[in-house]
Image (cartoon, grey):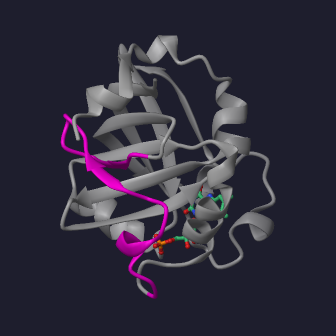
Amino acid sequence: MHMEDRFNKIHAEDIPDNVFKLIGKDWMLITAGNKDEYNMMTASWGTAGVLWKKPVIFTFVRPQRYTYEFMEQNARFSVSFFEEKHREILNICGTTSGRDLNKMNIDGLTPMVTPADTVSFREARLVLECRKIYFDDIDPAFFQVFDLETIYPTRDYHRFYVGEIVGAWQKK
Ligand SMILES: Cc1cc2nc3c(=O)[nH]c(=O)nc-3n(C[C@H](O)[C@H](O)[C@H](O)COP(=O)(O)O)c2cc1C
């Protein structure tokens, strides 16, 4: 399938969604790897905007996630958003680890390799192809006001990845 058949390429600044709702309520599927071996997880913490003159998205991945290994091993990743009817898939990808279930076989998700060589899914309504341009780990020493025990009782501080949005695709 050519991605152009199903999606329109748009500029990141023309993404019509409210980013608070898009990430926080709709949730995103972060996918890294290649067509033969990839993994994805649901995420609802992150942000999108502009940094270093580039459109970017920040994703936060705890180190114990299987997806973390794929984020580390690959220069690119995708972030995909879905219509409400696909919520159950996001629930599965957000509660099951690829270490226990091969997520490449989940019903209702058809993988597609995007022009920028990321893996996303035909069923998505919005796909952001991302190039990893920076990462860092949350450092507990730098919190100013925060209840660390609530969010990080096991000290599994997120690694955040700044992805340059090299392609944004909206379902036709
Ligand atoms: C709504 C929702 C949001 C989530 N957001 C994040 C997140 O931003 N970062 C993160 O590390 N895990 C997040 N998770 C948890 C992972 O999706 C979950 O641990 C998943 O099973 C990891 O899969 P993996 O081990 O195959 O990578 C979220 C889960 C749900 C249900």
Q: What's the residue at 50%, 52% (across, down)?
A: 29
> Quadrant of the image for the N terminus?
top left
Residue 165 visible, this orientation? no
Tell me if residue 86 comes above or below residue 168 in the rendering: below
Residue 70 visible, this orientation? yes
User: Residue 61: image x %, image y %?
Assistant: 49, 59
Where on the picture, by quarter, is residue 22?
top right
Q: Which residues are magenta?
A: 100-122
Tell me if residue 8 comes above or below residue 37 in the rendering: above
Q: What's the residue at 68%, 69% (across, down)?
A: 152
Q: What's the residue at 28%, 61% (across, down)?
A: 72
User: Residue 63: image x %, image y %?
Assistant: 46, 70
Q: Nearer the viewer, residue 46 or 129?
A: 129
Q: What's the residue at 64%, 28% (across, down)?
A: 19
Q: Nearer the viewer, residue 22 or 106?
A: 106
User: Residue 7: image x %, image y %?
Assistant: 38, 27
Q: Ligand 1: which quarter?
A: bottom right
